[in-house]
Image: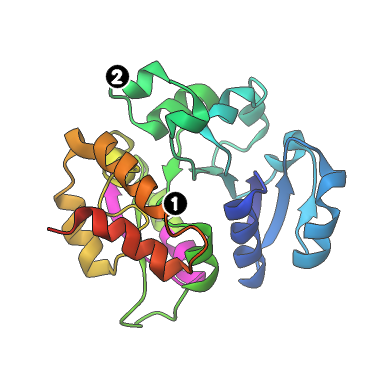
Amino acid sequence: MNIGVIGTGNIGQVIITKLRDAGHSVKMANARGPESLKDLAAKTGAIPVSVEEVVRDVDILFVVVPQKSIPALAKGLLDEARKETIVIDVGNYYPFRDGHIDEIENGLTESAWVEKQIERPVIKVLNSIGSEALAAAGRPAGSTDRIALPISGDNSEAKQIVAQLIDCIGFDSVDAGTIAESWRQQPGSPVYCTNPTKEELQLWLKNVDRSSLVTYREKGLKAYLAHLDADYQAGSKAFRSVFAK
């Protein structure tokens, strides 16, 4: 497939690398311009382009930027994308980084807010796994320790295509419902950065308490920061410890 990626931070770079390793054609862009991506291009074979160019003629477009950076994307940027292009939102809302976003604080899901900003429907996936785990934890299909990722969105066909892509980079997936239900995979959910198996993910998605998301988001962040220099398993255990009875 032809894939575009906006955002080349830690998780954006891992996504680019995984997709290139899986044989996909990848264009990438960031706010600093193509010249800043020469080293990553040499390392991965992805093509550095402008933000305006990265949306054109791609089957899937990954948006991998902080929530605060979404409004900075050019108005009408996605008008240059094909109507059938699947747009994937990989972001998460953290007020300490993104500032206070009233609509999200008042109950709009993070991805529904993104949809309003970019004026396109999105599929939410890859927000619930850290960059270290995404880089190192992919496993062949059927592995007992294969991590599963939730996928939310309103287009069932698009979700199936995304599920196939997730499978080819080494992860299972579970349909987590619509964008209105995507709060189930936001920070503070027991499925967030806990690297669940498919069976765990299916169970935990049903049992997310929306009213506790903010509390557990802050507890999870604090637990994770205490293990910041550890490997991804330690980070996962830190997030899981927040929900331990």
Q: Secondary structure at mark 2?
A: loop
Instruction: Give the image location of residue 177, x and y in percent.
Output: 26, 45
Foreground residue among 118 and 145: 145
Q: Secondary structure at mark 1?
A: helix
Instruction: Give the image location of residue 137, x and y in percent.
Output: 46, 73
**Magenta span has 172?**
yes
Instruction: Give the image location of residue 159, x and y in percent.
Output: 39, 52
Foreground residue among 3 and 69: 69
Q: Is residue 42 left or right of residue 158?
A: right
Q: Quadrant of residue 54?
A: top right
Please report the residue visible at 70 percent of the width from the left and 61 percent of the height from the top. 25
Q: Could you say which disc has been placed on residue 225 in the image?
A: 1
Q: Callout 2, which amino acid? A: Asn
Q: Earlier in the sequence, mark 1 or mark 2?
A: 2
Q: Is residue 84 left or right of residue 129?
A: right
Q: Is residue 20 left or right of residue 206?
A: right
Please report the residue visible at 41 percent of the width from the left and 34 percent of the height from the top. 111
Please report the residue visible at 72 percent of the width from the left and 49 percent of the height from the top. 28
Compared to residue 215, the image places residue 2 above or below, namely below
Q: Quadrant of residue 6?
A: top right
Compared to residue 231, the image places residue 215 above or below, namely above
Q: How is the image coloured?
A: rainbow
Mark 2, other Cα within 10 Å: few <14 / some 14–19 / many ≥20: few
Q: How much space separates mark 1 and mark 2, taking CA atoms?
A: 27 Å
Extent of the magenta region: 163-178
Q: Residue furthest top?
A: 102
**Magenta span has 217?**
no
Query: Is any atom of residue 178 visible in this view?
Result: no
Q: Which residue is mark 2?
A: 106
Q: Could you say which disc has been placed on residue 164 in the image?
A: none
Q: Callout 1, which amino acid? A: Leu
